[in-house]
Amino acid sequence: MASALINVPPSARRGEIIQIKTLISHVMETGYRRTSLGVVIPRDILRLFVCSYNGEEVFRAEIHPAIAANPYFAFNTIATESGTLVFTWTGDNGFSATESVAIRVE
Amino acid sequence: MKRRDFLAVGGVIGAAFGLGAAAVRATPAEVKEAILQLTGTARVTAGRVTLDLPPLVENGNSVPLTIRVDSPMTVADHVKAVHVFVEKNPQPYVASLHLGPRAGRASVSTRIRLADSQTVVAVCQMSDGSFWSGSAESVVTLAACTEPSS
């Protein structure tokens, strides 16, 4: 099963720009590689990563096989209010993973 | 298996792999077309976009890339999206990163695959409809994407 690492500062001042780092374990098989017998290994990648802050989308990445295995993203958002950050990854073969992290804004 | 058979099989596999590797390769023209599809008739101006990419990469399977765009990131003037392209991977697309005024700072980091020494291009779409671009070059000693798995 997928495991994700998410780094969000647990608390922030209102209006502060915070950096969010995410990493999820996934092979990101490109669909261009072959086995030693010449058989093409079928594609198995993540296609979409979305981060929403209290229901509002703050970052979205549409990704292709050129993203390295175990996709890593670091991006910024403004800490507006206390609430929840929801991270969703979707991909080939019905892959879907969701994680949520609470943030306290003072 | 006799030595002769072994060589024959090896030759066939080698040829198949060689052909496959030659067939799957984007070209600078494809990148231009992909960018054109994105921008339509709008002009793309060089500048405002900075790519942080190591100039020399040992392993193309995981290359750190940071993209920064010079933008105030306000509701009136912000980065809508950054599209990343490469010339010599099997396909020109790497990622489309969508930001907005909620981002606060237009800076995104990720890790990409590079199948060869090549130029990475980022095209940035601003909220006013203008397009800006930046690029960086990297020399890769061990390629990614098409190598056989062991």
Image: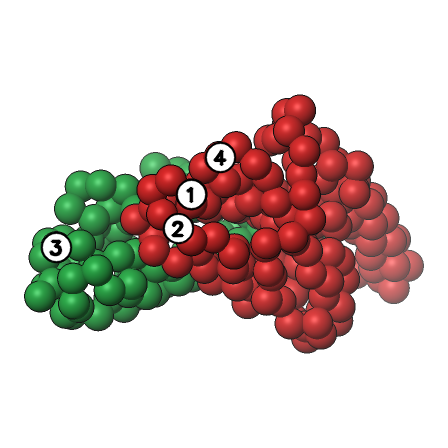
Chain colours: A green, B red
Residue under label 2? B73
The answer to whether residue A106 shows anywhere in this view is yes
Element carrying mark 3: loop
* Amino acid at the residue labelled 4: Asp
How many angstroms separate mark 3 from mark 2 (CA)?
19 Å
- Left or right: residue A74 compared with residue A83: right
Residue under label 3? A81
Picture quadrant where residue A2 is located: bottom left
Q: Are marks 4 and 1 in contact (CB under 8 Å)?
A: yes
The answer to whether residue B98 shows anywhere in this view is no
Vertical position of residue B149 compared to residue B99: above or below: below
Marked residue chain, label 1: B
> Neighbour class for label 2 at 10 Å: few (<14), some, many (≥20)?
many
Which of pointers 4 and 1 lies earlier in the amino acid sequence? Answer: 1
Q: Which mark is residue B128?
A: 4
- Left or right: residue B72 compared with residue B40: left
Residue under label 1? B77
Marked residue chain, label 2: B
Q: Nearer the viewer, residue A21 or B60?
A: A21
* Amino acid at the residue labelled 3: Glu
